[in-house]
Image (cartoon, helix red, strand yellow):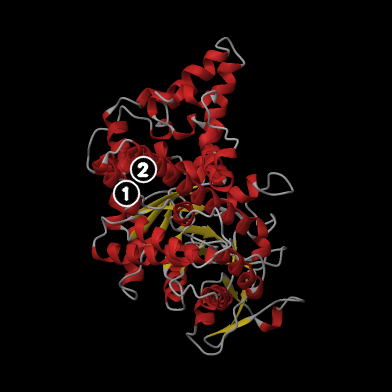
Amino acid sequence: MTYQQTLAEADKQIATQDSWNGIDAESVARMRLQNRFRTGLDIARHTATIMRADMAAYDADPAAYTQSLGCWHGFIGQQKLISIKKHFGTTKGRYLYLSGWMVAALRSEFGPLPDQSMHEKTSVAALIEELYTFLRQADARELGMLFRDLDAARAAGDEVRTKQVQAKIDGFETHVVPIVADIDAGFGNAEATYLLAKKMIEAGACCIQIENQVSDEKQCGHQDGKVTVPHEDFLAKIRAVRYAFMELGVDDGVIVARTDSLGAGLTKQIAYTREKGDIGDQYNSFLDCEEVDPATLGHGDVLISRDGTLVRPKRLPSNLFQFRAGTGEDRCVLDCITSLQNGADLLWIETEKPHIGQIGGMVSRIREVIPNAKLVYNNSPSFNWTLNFRQQVFDAWAEAGKDVSAYDRAKLMSVDYDTTALAIEADERIRTFQKDAAAQAGIFHHLITLPTYHTAALSTDNLAREYFGDQGMLGYVKNVQRQEIRQGIACVKHQNMSGSDIGDDHKEYFAGEAALKAGGEHNTMNQFAA
């Protein structure tokens, strides 16, 4: 609804109530526009529609890929979206990512934890709610400033300016964007997954990412010791998430099925098999087995029959079973195909390096069965991007017969190589990685899981070094406040960012001329007006 339509609706409602003395229709209209999303489900439905449209756009043109950054606090997510709107004029194609790793490391009541799903499961839904609370406040803040501009234009009798501001209000683009939310391995069985998925959706999540590890053996995708589950177990959890979306009326909800099989060499279970070639039999076919003579069976040995032959799966002292070496890619492909055939919408393949050829090779095999298969991909900080891409260029040059004698492949991270032709080409490959991978490897959504964890650490280290050192207060003023002012960083006016102007508006709505407002001429925030 336009501003005038919202105002007319409020005016009509107030006119029917004789006792609503002092309730101003324009104030009501403004508050309604500032809070257009009433519940988390409103957000989930709205953002699911956006994400589905983006997926269709990518199918038509791989250049229309989407992006996100992982955010561990509502303020971080808010500042990201404010920055995107400032620099690009639109939030189209930009999402939020909620990382289970960062919830564990930064949001657990136990203190910092590794990425092993040991944090409170409700902290995931709580962070979704917090992120959207801050994004809704960003809407209210920006619209509030537009309303002030409108009042100023009216007071000056400037009709042209009044119409311009009204057009901005009517064309306002919300900061509320889709979130890809990490439910890890579901925090338990399928019922536990369903219950947590509901909480996440009710908080606003339109997209839930779930992985095929064993819940109680969960590890970070970039660490060793990962243990996968048979497909039937994983598919039950995918169905549980879909039921949660449908129960809550978020019919366009998106499920990302993540496979860790490329780096996971272990399983906790031998899959149940009904007939040869079924999904359980295919899972078991990757087990590392040895033929046995019934006469030499050991006490407690576990055997399976394979084509009429008894074989013994290799079992570790941990009671985990081992897959054959070199089967990870085949297992990934099977994981992806079965997930897409059973309710998932997008895939996530956790790889050990950012290599377009490796990713694209697997996607090509998946697309032989599911032609529109597409990925969410982790542009992970766990990768050493500089070293990986310099080595990729080194290998490509060597294969092409180019002289690489000036380079030591094992030491390419060295600053000594920063200005070389090899490093320059590697940096260009990093710069275009997302665009190239979207075109060549089926990646619809690029995200960085932990960027704001690292930026917070880096900026804090720089400030601490200077402020507590010889630079003193200049360490803050020169490299923080002065840069905020010159770059137009919104939170340089931190009182405004925290909602003081919104509060002043409300005080005036509620108390009129008697309102005691904080934003008067003596507010030090006015020093940043220029």
Occupied quadrant, residue 490 = top left
Work out whether 111 lies above or below 299. above
The residue to which callout 2 is attached is: 150
Q: Nearer the viewer, residue 253 or 143?
A: 143
| Residue shown at 29% from the left, 32% from the top | 424
**Residue located beneath label 1 in the image:** 166
Residue 487: image x %, image y %?
38, 28
Closer to the chain start, of discs 1 and 2, is 2
Front residue of 443 and 412: 443
Q: Outermost residue, right direction?
A: 299
Q: Residues within 10 Å of mark 2 (few under 14, many from 20)?
A: many
Within-10-Å neighbours for mark 1: few <14, some 14–19, many 20+: some
Rendered location of residue 75, percent (x, y) = 54, 42
**Residue sitting at x 63%, y 59%:** 218
Viewer-proximal residue, 395 or 269? Answer: 269
Residue lying at 34% horizontally and 41% vertically, measured from the top left: 154
Does 213 sit left or right of 150 as displayed? right
Asked if one can make out residue 395 in the rendered structure from this viewpoint, the answer is no
Q: Are marks 1 and 2 in contact (CB under 8 Å)?
A: yes
Q: Position of residue 456 (x, y in %)?
A: 54, 35
The quarter of the picture where residue 243 lies is: bottom right
Q: Amino acid at mark 1?
A: Gln
The disc label shown at residue 227, or none: none
Q: Secondary structure at mark 2?
A: helix
